[in-house]
């Protein structure tokens, strides 16, 4: 079995361009840059774990609030199939794409499966300013009962930052230079806005603080 490649031997495969931000952070030293690169991946994985937990509990809380509100209207069907209230072609495209994926997979088109198919960006956009006087005021504020006063901008700011972080991790980009402790704290706070017990659970399963402390 061949031996492990040296740090210099790895650089052509990882590429100098990819390692450049890490080398720049440690004065150009490749021996110090590679451990930082490895740690960047480790902290990204730890953050993705808790981001996944948050995404699931947040979309379900938002779905419950929207479903309760929609049931009080004279409309029929599901809230996410109502273009009148989504009034945005990108969001309706997200919903149609979710239906399509279920159909292609031969899965039953149930409410829960559609909700699970909708991407993070869908939920983030529902919290944007264009829905302040509609979906937020009528429904979505109830998904975050722990937030007082109930400011949509506070929720959106956290969700938007976390969405950007999630995308950077998914695309294997550097995050070592960001205030990751602050992002983690915001994530836990948002979970607590949904439910204090949920926030405590996400905190209890998070590896982020441990991995942050191990930064080379």
Image (cartoon, helix red, strand yellow):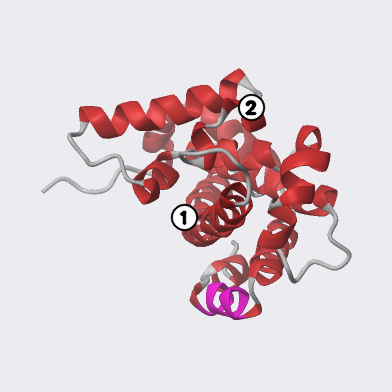
- Residue identified by numbered label 2: 84
- Residue identified by numbered label 1: 45
Judge by depth and name the residue closer to the eye, 206 or 8.
206
Looking at this view, name the residue that lies furthest to the right.
Answer: 149
**Percent position of residue 43, x then y:** 54, 57
User: Above or below — where is 216 with respect to 70?
Assistant: below
Is 202 placed left or right of 180 in the picture? left
Q: Is mark 1 on a helix, strand or loop?
A: helix
**Percent position of residue 117, x then y:** 40, 40
Q: Is mark 2 on a helix, strand or loop?
A: helix
Q: Which mark is residue 118?
A: none
User: Above or below — where is 150 with respect to 139?
Assistant: below
Is 24 placed left or right of 90 in the picture? right
Q: Distance between the residues labelled 2 and 1?
A: 39 Å
Judge by depth and name the residue closer to the eye, 215 or 153.
153
Is 59 placed left or right of 195 in the picture? left
Residue that appears at 70% across and 61% down = 142
Quadrant in which the C terminus appears? bottom right
**Percent position of residue 187, x then y:** 66, 61
Residue that appears at 28% across and 34% down = 102
Judge by depth and name the residue closer to the eye, 58 or 111.
111
What range is drawn magenta here? Answer: 197-204
User: Above or below — where is 81 with respect to 113?
Assistant: above
Crowd class of label 2 (few under 14; some 14 to 19; many from 20; radius 10 Å): few
Magenta segment: does it hold 57?
A: no
Residue that appears at 48% across and 50% down = 41
**Counting residues from the N terminus, which is met first, the one under dot 2 or under dot 1?**
1
Q: Main secondary structure of the magenta part?
A: helix
**Percent position of residue 154, x then y:** 82, 53
Q: In which quarter of the image is residue 189?
A: bottom right
Magenta segment: does it hold 201?
A: yes
Q: In this orientation, does residue 169 appear?
A: yes
């Amino acid at each position: 079995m061949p031996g492990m490649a040296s740090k210099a031997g790895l650089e052509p495969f990882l590429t100098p361009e990819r390692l450049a931000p890490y080398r720049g952070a440690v004065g150009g030293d490749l021996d110090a840059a590679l451990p930082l690169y490895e740690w960047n991946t480790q902290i990204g994985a730890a953050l993705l774990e808790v981001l996944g937990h948050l995404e699931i509990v947040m979309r379900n809380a938002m779905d419950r609030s929207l479903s309760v509100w929609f049931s009080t209207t004279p409309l029929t069907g599901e809230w996410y199939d109502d273009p009148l209230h989504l009034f945005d072609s990108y969001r309706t495209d997200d919903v149609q794409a979710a239906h399509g994926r279920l159909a292609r997979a031969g899965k039953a088109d149930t409410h829960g499966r559609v909700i699970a198919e909708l991407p993070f960006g869908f939920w983030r956009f529902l919290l944007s300013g264009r829905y302040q006087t509609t979906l937020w005021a009528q429904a979505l504020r109830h998904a975050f009962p722990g937030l007082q006063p109930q400011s949509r901008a506070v929720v959106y700011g956290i969700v938007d930052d976390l969405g950007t972080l999630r995308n950077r991790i998914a695309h294997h980009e550097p995050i070592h230079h960001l205030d990751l402790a602050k992002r983690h704290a915001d994530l836990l706070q948002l979970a607590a806005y949904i439910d204090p017990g949920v926030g405590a659970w996400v905190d209890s399963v998070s590896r982020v603080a441990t991995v942050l402390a191990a930064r080379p």
